Image (tube, rainbow, N blue to C red):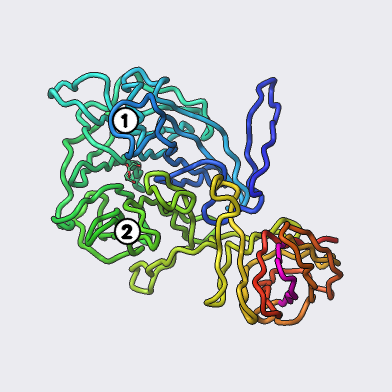
Amino acid sequence: MTACKHYLIMGGIVILSILNTQAQNPIIRDQFSADPSARVFNGRVYVFPSHDIPTPAEKPGRKDWFCMEDYHVFSSENLTDWNDHGVIVSQTSVPWVDSTSYSMWAPDCIERNGKYYFYFPANTKTVDPNGRRGFGIGVAVAEKPEGPYIPQPEPINGVHGIDPNVFIDKDGQAYLYWSMRDIYVAKLNENMLEMDSEPVAIQNLPSEGLKEGPYLFERNGMYYLTFPHVENNIERLEYAIGESPMGPFKMAGVIMDESPMNCWTNHHSVINYQEQWYLFYHQNEYSPEFDKNRSICIDSLSFKTDGTIQKIIPTRRGVGQTKASSKIQLDHYSEKSEGAAIAFLDTADMFAGWKSILTQKGDWMQYNAVQFTGKETSLKLKYRATNGGQVQLRLAGIHAGFVADLELQSGDDWKEVDLDLMPVSAGIHNPVLLLETDDPVEIDWIQFEN
Ligand code: FUB
């Protein structure tokens, strides 16, 4: 079990808010989410992803393709607990969008002068003035990051493509980037709704293999144009650097290699939040057999002294601290022994989450950055151990030490056990669960109680 639903009543309006109190990677755990565009607004992180759904029977055309009918926005203060603010724009709420196309692909959002501009691509109802059908890019405007967003009646004139990204430079000039085979850039007007220059295709990027999903950010006067690119078989995240938002750029390296779970796409954004850089990206954890149903993840990003980006290996642990009193999902481990494994709890309902499996004596799983108050007195564990067994809980790292030994009863059903703990000091610790006996055991979660 990974998410609990709360209904909040605010000013007479009922708002559904999903509080993912154990959220690690993927961060959204009750629906698919992809193409995360993260932004820091008013000291809080907002993520504007696309929303993959299983293809409904009524969708015309290909069934084994991307299928997206609306957008949600999510926000968090600690990168662990995420609130779902609900649907902000849907294919039936935008006048120019073909409302049967399920083509609401990767969006972006930016703030200017206290207004929030949400950019999104979708299939147009009609041909554009140049006779082109296909993807247009539209804007919806709100007074608050979570909406309500009011869509403009027409898409941005002169833009034909997908994956919009907006960057506002220190001098106040805004730029729109998008992709359509090449990656394009144009200046945006003060009003953020119209182009202020002719689009140009950015040069010196790889000429072979699909490029899409541009995301531009600036650090120490260096402009990083980051984008997914198919160098070999599937997309990986690459970047180029330049001294101005329109380039020229030169290729600088790979941020993330091809997905280890073979997700054909990746799509990302980069933010600095509370003095730390983060990469938001997606994989297909909840849909290993169909990579068009994706899920968004976060990992920390860092720079080398010359300003180049340290390559990131996707983790299950993700970022943020986890409260000792929450149900800690060891299957989102930071490290594990070779024999330890994870599996879905229920293959008919992937959103039920995963379990950890310690197979043989000596197997272990470690989960980093757990916040202890120092008042915890017992450890609770949900497990299944057909032949019974014994596990030990230890703390890794500088606080290394033994905390508890738990005897697990044999049986084919899930059980919960409670046991007294040795005192644990207040602060951040990295618990490790170690199997001390020979038969396999499965763990759903562990939890510390006062
Ligand atoms: O989500 C649909 C498309 O897949 C996006 O627009 C691309 O960037 C890729 O992630």
Q: Is residue 174 something that shows in the picture?
A: no
At mark 2, the secondary structure is: strand
Residue sitting nearer the eye, 321 or 7: 7
Residue of label 1: 122
Residue of label 2: 237
For label 1, count other residues whose C-alpha is less than 10 Å away and answer few (under 14), some (14-19) or many (20+): many
The correct choice, above or below, for 59 with respect to 423 in the image is: above
- Whether the magenta-drawn stretch holds residue 418 is answered as no
- Whether the magenta-drawn stretch holds residue 389 is answered as yes
Task: Identify the image quadrant of the C terminus.
Answer: bottom right
Residue sitting nearer the eye, 240 or 193: 240
In the image, taking residue 70 as reference, residue 327 lies left or right, namely right
Ligand 1 is found in which quarter of the picture? top left
The correct choice, above or below, for 422 with respect to 255 in the image is: below
Q: Position of residue 145 (x, y in %)?
A: 51, 35
Quarter location, residue 349: top right
* Residue at the image point whose x is 49% and y is 44% from the top: 47
Quarter location, residue 190: top left
Range covered by the magenta-colored residues: 383-394
For label 2, count other residues whose C-alpha is less than 10 Å away and answer few (under 14), some (14-19) or many (20+): many
The correct choice, above or below, for 126 with respect to 377 in the image is: above
Quarter location, residue 108: top left
Q: Position of residue 194 (x, y in %)?
A: 27, 28
Q: Position of residue 192 (x, y in %)?
A: 34, 31
Magenta span dominant secondary structure: strand
